[in-house]
Amino acid sequence: MKTAIITDIHSNIEALTVVLDDIDRQGYDRIICLGDVVGYGADPNACCDVIRERNILTLLGNHDAAVTGAMDESYYYQGARNAIQWTRDKLTEENYRWLYSLPYTYVEEDVGFFHSAPVMPSGFFYVVQNQEAMAHSQIVDRLKPISFIGHAHQVMVFAINAKQAVLVKHTDIKISNHTRYIANIGSVGQPRDRDPRACYAVWDHTAKKLEYIRLEYDIKSAADKIFAAGLDSKFGNRLFKGL
Ligand SMILES: [Fe+2]
């Protein structure tokens, strides 16, 4: 079985459409979304609608939580907070209720799905620094062989055991009894790893292999909508650079 994993769409319907079209063409068995469907971008309803219509299993991201009031919006700087309030005003009743209903985690026999650090899903912590990965060493026996997370908008995999955490290439994942993996899945709608292309990943449950896919999309159209909506222009400008 192959699972396509998408995350951090951030109201970017142009990027989401290209990613879903590619997933459909490849014919993967299912899609799981790790959250942050909204925030920053100009198309919150279009993104929620398409994910709801397709019944894609979706987790709660921090922006989704802030929009619905489950997270204190004062955590955010002014521009992001404005986008959160703007999104809240724009959301349809159905989409607001749907975001409100999303869970923090989805865990199966061999794999876990989270928006952010598995050690505390409601805390929305990053796992991009070694010490953040190391925070999981104390619960390493409780982790599934591999956990997929969003939130950082970067492509990055850590191998963790009871003593250490090390950054590894995604092609070097070797599932065993001693090592647990946390894989950052990147971002569909706002990549921050200096590659502006939309990102998603595919986990092959049989071969135990992770693949990242990058796709060009109409960045100008997504950015122009952000500018026209009066949201912080930084959210549009960064799309061109992948920052
Ligand atoms: Fe995000």
Image (spheres, rainbow, N blue to C red):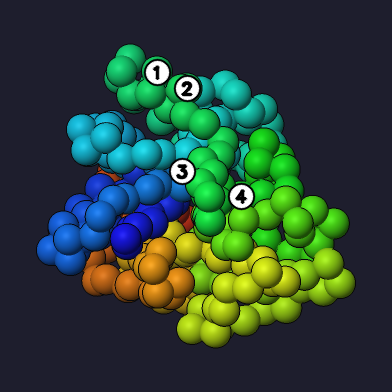
Element class at badge 2: helix
The answer to whether residue 71 is visible is yes
- The answer to whether 105 appears left or right of 219 in the picture is right
Q: Which residue is mark 2?
A: 100
Q: In percent of the image, x 32 and y 73: which residue is there?
A: 214
User: Which residue type carries mark 4?
Assistant: Ser
- How far apart, in angstroms, are the residues tagged by discs 1 and 4? 22 Å
Residue visible at 48% across and 63% down in the picture = 185
Mark 3 or mark 2, which is nearer the start of the sequence? 3
Q: Residues within 10 Å of mark 2 (few under 14, many from 20)?
A: some
**What amino acid type is highlighted by mark number 2?**
Tyr
Type of amino acid at the residue the image marks with label 3 = Gly
Are the residues at dot 4 and dot 3 in contact (C-beta closer than 8 Å)? no
| Mark 1 surroundings within 10 Å by alpha-carbon count, few (fewer than 14), some (14 through 19), many (20 or more) | few
Where 38 sits versus 174, above or below? above
Residue picked out by circle 4 = 116
Spot occupied by residue 83 in the image (x, y as percentages of width and height): 47, 37
Asked if disc 3 is less than 8 Å from ligand 1, the answer is yes
C-alpha distance separating marks 2 and 3: 12 Å
- The circle drawn on residue 97 is 1
